[in-house]
Image (cartoon, rainbow, N blue to C red):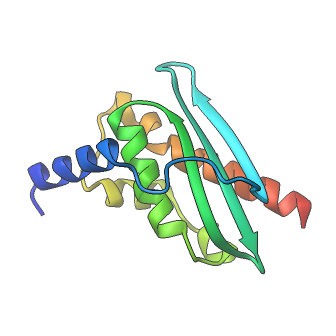
Amino acid sequence: MSDSLYREQILEHWRTPQNFGKLVHPTHEAFENNPLCGDEIGIHLNVNNHVVGDIRFYGVGCAISMAATSMLTEIILGKKIEELKKIKKEDVFNLLGVMPSPSRVKCALLGLSTFKKALQIFEQTE
């Protein structure tokens, strides 16, 4: 895929993010922000039998942080916790299809960081 197609995919996820919103009764949740740019992301999970049955995210941020989190939620949904613990920053960059500039790396990884925090909360409650 060309860089322009990846950029269009990022813009599409920013305009119409997948899994955006809040769950009424999440089993686990986490919130993080990037004080350098003001991006904020919260993640709600419903985990049953160590599987993410539902996920939503909410917040405000730049196109990169919103798109990366939207894409990330799509690959998280329906997966086992053990599998999800293995998600790395390179996986997020692969989802985006382009390497963000150094000043945007933290934006791209904010959703992953928030999700990892939710996983830590899950592990503490198990």
Q: Seen in the image, is 59 located left or right of residue 52?
A: left
Instruction: Using the image, determine if residue 44 lies above or below residue 47.
Output: above
- Of the 4 image quadrants, the one containing the N terminus is bottom left
Coordinates of residue 20 in the picture (x, y in percent): 49, 49
Quadrant of image for the C terminus: bottom right
Residue 30, position as x, y percentages in the image:
71, 45
Where does the image place residue 88, in percent across and percent down from the top left? 51, 59
Furthest residue in direction front, as rendered: 24
Relative to residue 86, is residue 122 depicted above or below? above
Q: Nearer the viewer, residue 43 or 87?
A: 43
Q: Residue at x 27, y 48 (%)?
A: 10
Vertical placement of residue 106 versus 6, above or below: above
Count of labels shown?
A: 0
Residue located at (42% from left, 61% from top): 91
Residue at x 75%, y 77% (from the top left corner): 50
Residue 86: x and y, percent? 58, 68
Please report the residue visible at 71 percent of the width from the left and 53 percent of the height from the top.
Answer: 24
